[in-house]
Image: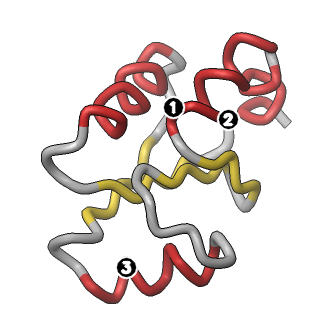
Amino acid sequence: MKKVTLYSGDPCPYCAAAKALLKTKNVEIEEFDIWKDPTKAKEMIQRTNGAKTIPQIFVGEHHVGGNEQLQDANRSGELDKLLSS
């Protein structure tokens, strides 16, 4: 299963929802709090081509997007495909 990278902050209900979903998939989550680590904020903006909202989620090197896109990918079955490929 691929590693998931989650750029987040606290408090953030959307980040919490994304983490809760990912935990049901039993995946390893590498989480970076962009409010505590400005270098990770810059990294996130660069990796997402300018996205500044959190969370920003990557499965491997694939940019899923935010929580809404993650939830949509889960409903469509795309998330499971991304995690297993």
Q: Which structural element holds mark 1? A: loop
The three-letter amino acid code for the residue at tag 1 is Val
Q: Return the disc, 3 or 1, that comes first in the chain's sequence.
A: 1
Task: Return the residue nearer the eye: 84 or 75.
Answer: 75
- What is the x, y in percent for residue 78? 81, 24
Q: Which mark is residue 27?
A: 1
- Residue 11 quadrant: top left
Residue at point 51% right, 54% down? 56
The three-letter amino acid code for the residue at tag 2 is Met
Q: Which residue is mark 2?
A: 1
Q: Quadrant of the N terminus?
A: top right
Residue at point 53% right, 18% down? 25
- What is the x, y in percent for residue 84? 78, 30
Asked if disc 3 and disc 1 are in contact, CB closer than 8 Å, the reply is no
14, above or below 39, in the image: above
Count of residue discs: 3
- What is the x, y in percent for residue 73? 72, 25
Distance in Å between CA atoms under marks 3 and 1: 21 Å
Q: Which residue is mark 3?
A: 40
Residue at point 42% right, 50% down? 55
Q: Which structural element holds mark 2? A: loop
